[in-house]
Structures are given as C-alpha cells and as structure tokens.
C-alpha cells in the first residue's frame, strides 16, 4: 500500500504510524466494554495531498491520489498509510523549530485533535534521523531527514504493541508521511489482560507461572497483541505474556494469531 510508481517514492525508516471540514471526530463507536478504536479519515488529516486527481480501489486498498501524494486505506483493517511523492512542495518545507520535543508535541496534538483517544496513549517519542529517499520527476535522487513522531498505545498501562500512529509534521503544520492502525479491542481481551497483569503482580502465582513456561520468562512482560495492519482476514487479539518473540497465555501456552500462521485469509 503506497504511492504512485511514477514518482518513485521510497520511504526508509531507520527503526521500527486544522482538519478538513467540521465533521465529527474519527473515533470508532465501540460496544460498551470494548476499548474504542480510531480510524484515520482523510477529512480529518493534515496530510499534504495536493489537488485530488482520482480515487481507486485495487487489491483491497482504497487510494485517494493527489498531485503531491497518496492517501491509502486498507479496506479490511482500515490501516492508513499516506505518502508524499517527489512533486510535493512540502518536501522542502522547514522542520518544526524545537527539535524532537516540538515534533512529538505536534504529532500528539494532531492525532488527538483528529479523534485518537488521549487516554490510550502510552508514550510519544521521536524516531530521529528517519530518511526519506525520493526521486523527483526528471531529477536526481535526494534525501531529507526529519524526526518521526511515534505514538504507542496502551490499556491500563499494558502496551498494545501492534497498534500504531506516526507522522512527519513540518513547520507548515502539514504532514508529509503518516500512518495509523488503531483497531477496537474486544472486552474479553481486556479482561484477560487485567487477569494476566494480576497474576504477574502476585509473587506466588507468578513464580508458578514462570516455572510452567518452556522458556526463561524472567524478562517477560504483559502486553496485548492483535493481528497486523496488513492482515485481510478476521481481526483477532489476545492478552499475552511476551518473552522475546514468543507470546504465552495465562495458562503458559503459546499464542499464535492467525496472521502469524503463514496462511492466507
């Protein structure tokens, strides 16, 4: 999911997601007890799209194509990825004065204003020296460097590690690149997460749990996992005790979400 091939845009990340109109915020209305998600809508975005030229729907992705870039939404997961191309004048816009702290503040304010729930934000940080390599039409390759403002998500202090929201915001208060995937988390998963956190915080129970694990869990942590932004099957989520790259449920049994099985939906 990305920009037009004619512009030759390549986004390279060195590590590791005023609105348009007066519409209601983009937060998803979830059933009571669920953790509400957020769908990032174009009408709430500050992405520097330029004059809209066309809209397409191909391979499960809806793309709004502008003169300066593409705003793409995965039809099933509602993951958004917006990318500038080499024609965008914003590529030459100055960065925010104030460095990383200014960028993180601007990105948090931007997404909260668009409807991302403030009480689900775990941390906001700048990923420095992100490189954007672009190929302007008829010109040589170039690169620019910005800090990327990254938002991490949580529930009751438990990180929801697969959700994402990040953006590059420049001094003009427009974004050059942005991405959001913030799905609704079912109530049953939240209950399981609270139960697993309670187990970890009860020394006798936690010692028994660690003894039952097939790996050394001394560095493990409680998280919420869910299917990835690119998954086009049914959504799934689970509370997990994460040890390295392995996730375990409250019974010390491995958890494998459907997008990690290697099967197509």
Image: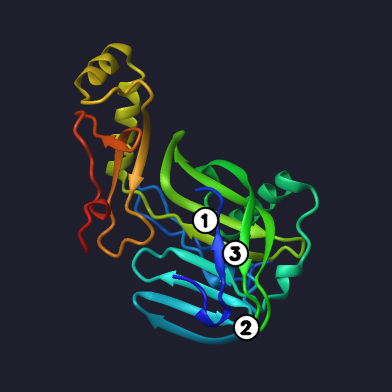
**Farthest bottom residue?**
53
Q: Secondary structure at mark 3?
A: strand
Percent position of residue 26, x then y: 51, 63
| Residue corresponding to mark 2 | 67
- Where is 256 relative to 116, above or below? above
User: Where is residue 252 shown, x and y percent of the image?
Assistant: 21, 28
Residue 106 seen anywhere in this rendered image of the structure: yes
Query: Quadrant of residue 37 in the image?
Result: bottom left
Tell me which label, 1 or 2, sits earlier in the chain: 1
Residue 36: x %, y % from top left: 42, 52
Q: Are marks 2 and 3 in contact (CB under 8 Å)?
A: no
- What mark, if any, has residue 58 been given in the picture? none
Q: Which residue is mark 1?
A: 17
Residue at left 38%, top 53%? 184
Residue under label 3: 177
Location of the C terminus by quadrant is bottom left
Q: Residues within 10 Å of mark 2 (few under 14, many from 20)?
A: some
Give the camera-side residue of 206 and 88. Answer: 88
Image side of residue 102 versus residue 246, left or right? right
* Tag 1 and tag 3, C-beta contact below 8 Å: no
Residue drawn at 64 percent across, 66 percent down: 176
Left or right side of 178 for 35: left
Density class for disc 3 (Cα within 10 Å; few <14, some 14-19, many ≥20) is: many
Q: Tell me the element at label 2.
A: loop
């Amino acid at each position: 999911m990305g920009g037009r091939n004619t512009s030759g845009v390549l986004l390279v990340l060195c590590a590791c997601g005023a609105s348009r109109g007066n519409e209601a915020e983009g937060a998803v209305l979830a059933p009571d007890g669920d953790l509400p998600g957020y769908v990032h809508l174009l009408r709430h975005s500050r992405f520097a799209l330029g004059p809209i030229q066309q809209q397409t729907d191909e391979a499960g992705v809806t793309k709004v194509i502008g003169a300066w870039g593409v705003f793409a939404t995965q039809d099933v997961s509602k993951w958004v990825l917006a990318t500038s191309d080499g024609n965008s004048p914003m590529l030459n816009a100055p960065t925010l004065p104030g460095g990383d702290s200014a960028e993180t503040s601007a990105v948090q304010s931007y997404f909260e204003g668009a409807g991302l729930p403030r009480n689900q934000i775990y941390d906001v940080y700048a990923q420095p020296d992100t490189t954007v390599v672009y190929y302007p039409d008829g010109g040589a390759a170039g690169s620019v460097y910005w800090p990327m403002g990254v938002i991490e998500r949580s529930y009751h202090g438990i990180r929801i590690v697969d959700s994402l929201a990040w953006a590059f915001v420049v001094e003009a208060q427009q974004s050059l690149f942005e991405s959001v995937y913030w799905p609704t988390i079912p109530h049953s998963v939240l209950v399981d997460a609270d139960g697993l956190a309670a187990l970890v915080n009860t020394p006798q129970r936690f010692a028994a749990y660690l003894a039952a694990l097939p790996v050394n869990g001394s560095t493990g942590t409680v998280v919420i996992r869910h299917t990835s932004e690119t998954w086009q099957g049914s959504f799934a989520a689970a509370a997990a005790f994460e040890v390295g790259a392995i996730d375990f449920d409250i019974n010390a049994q491995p958890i494998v979400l459907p997008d990690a099985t290697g099967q197509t939906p």
